[in-house]
Amino acid sequence: MRQLMAHEVMAVILAGGKGSRLEPLTRDRAKPAVPFGGAYRIIDFTLSNTLNSGIRKTLMLTQYKTMSLDRHINLGWQHYFKRELGEFIDIVPPQQRIDENWYQGTADAVYQNIYTIEREKPKYVVILAGDHIYKMDYAQLVLTHIENRADLTISTLKVPTSTAARRFGVLEVNEFNRVIGFAEKPVIPKELPYQRDYCLASMGIYVFNAHFLYEKLCQDAMDESSRHDFGGDIIPSMIDDHCVYAHPFNDENHKIDSYWRDVGTLDAYFDANMDLVDVEPQLNLYDENWPIWTFRPNCPPPKFVFAQEERCGCATDSIVCPGSIVSGATVQRSILGPRTRLNSYAKVEESILFSDVEIGRRAKIRHAIIDSGVRIEPGMEIGYDADLDRARGFYVTENGITIVNGGSYL
């Protein structure tokens, strides 16, 4: 199976969405490039899954604000692949080889790169999203696809119908997991027959037989009424006449509940990060059997200085990345990205600091996300008065999380 994954399977990662629901964090970067868990970017989870699954040929289709993502891939991921052995991870912006449009939908993004895929002669193509947090062995998905002799296999997850409404594609399957119905983002999702208030949702993870995929994409491209989307157009057109199967999500996180997060909103993103500082987080980042790979900057170890009663540099229930200095400051239930510096008497609670952040003396931060490169002035308080934060030009979420992005606040 390992040889098949390396030579006959290609992954195509869709990483071109605007990520508008994560603004202002996506003001200057693509959603997959948004930091997660201090040391990682969102894209690292999908890429780690491909690498751990044995896939050695990957196309990443990008479109908006790609500089940060391009830099991260070039610094942290290219060395895992040997081009002379036919291995690669290629970042592909819209080529406009077929027409002058940018990507019009998920299916159109793949269609515009059909020649690049064909040139590698894969037998199977795995279509992935680049903006979800989860751990999955795609080899098991491909094996299910082969065993069922399917044209398309969709990875699925059981979710509450209230969660799926207007957000996910919802499947109906028979007793053999063959798909007999599909609705894209229905207002009222169809419940599972054996579990009320739950439905079977598409994870946006697909395996196609390569030649069948080319055929469907070409047909869809000629349909002027199509939105050129896998969930909205390609999949619904296949259910009656082709062999489509569902594959239950095989979670390599190995916890009681399956872990899959769409961190598409600021509050969902904040909650997923805060889970990581729990004593037993739902997402296990310390599993050596399924590591999450990333770019590691060349930084010294984190440092904590001053052991005075009122000026103690300490961090509790927190993640502190390399290069950080906690100088007489207090950190509680927070994530400090690389090269952050907290000065004396500062206090940070339940917050996320990206890289290269500096917190001034006696400043107080709570329930906040501080973007890369921001410097907070001494004595400033953020997250204590939502109206004041908004008056300063900061964004405050529905759950009261203050977002400070770009610029200097000294």
Image (cartoon, rainbow, N blue to C red):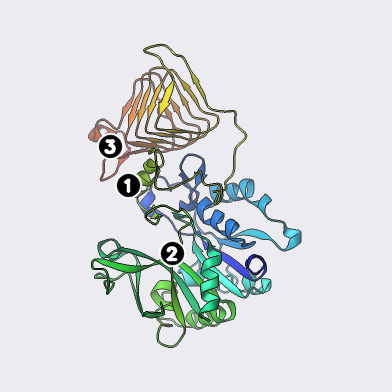
- Position of the N terminus by quadrant: bottom right
Which residue was labeled with disc 3? 390
Residue placed most toward the observer, 378 or 100: 378
Q: How far apart are marks 1 and 3 (CA)?
A: 17 Å
Instruction: Name the mark nearer the viewer: 3 or 2.
Output: 2
- Give me the residue at 41% from left, 79% from top: 176
Q: Mark 2 and mark 3 in contact (Cβ < 8 Å)?
A: no
* Left or right for 275, reference 92: left
Query: Helix or strand or loop: what does disc 3 sit on?
Result: helix
Sequence-first tag of 3 and 2: 2
In the rendering, at what x and y percent does residue 22 appear?
38, 50
Query: Helix or strand or loop: what does disc 2 sit on?
Result: loop
**Residue 267: numbered disc:** 1
* Left or right for 404, reference 48: left
Which residue was labeled with disc 2? 249
Q: Distance between the residues labelled 2 and 1?
A: 25 Å
Disc 1 residue type (three-letter): Asp
Q: How far apart are marks 3 and 2 (CA)?
A: 41 Å
Query: Helix or strand or loop: what does disc 1 sit on?
Result: helix
In the rendering, at what x and y percent does residue 242 appear?
46, 85
**Residue 137: numbered disc:** none
- Give me the residue at 60% from left, 31% from top: 299
Disc 2 residue type (three-letter): Phe
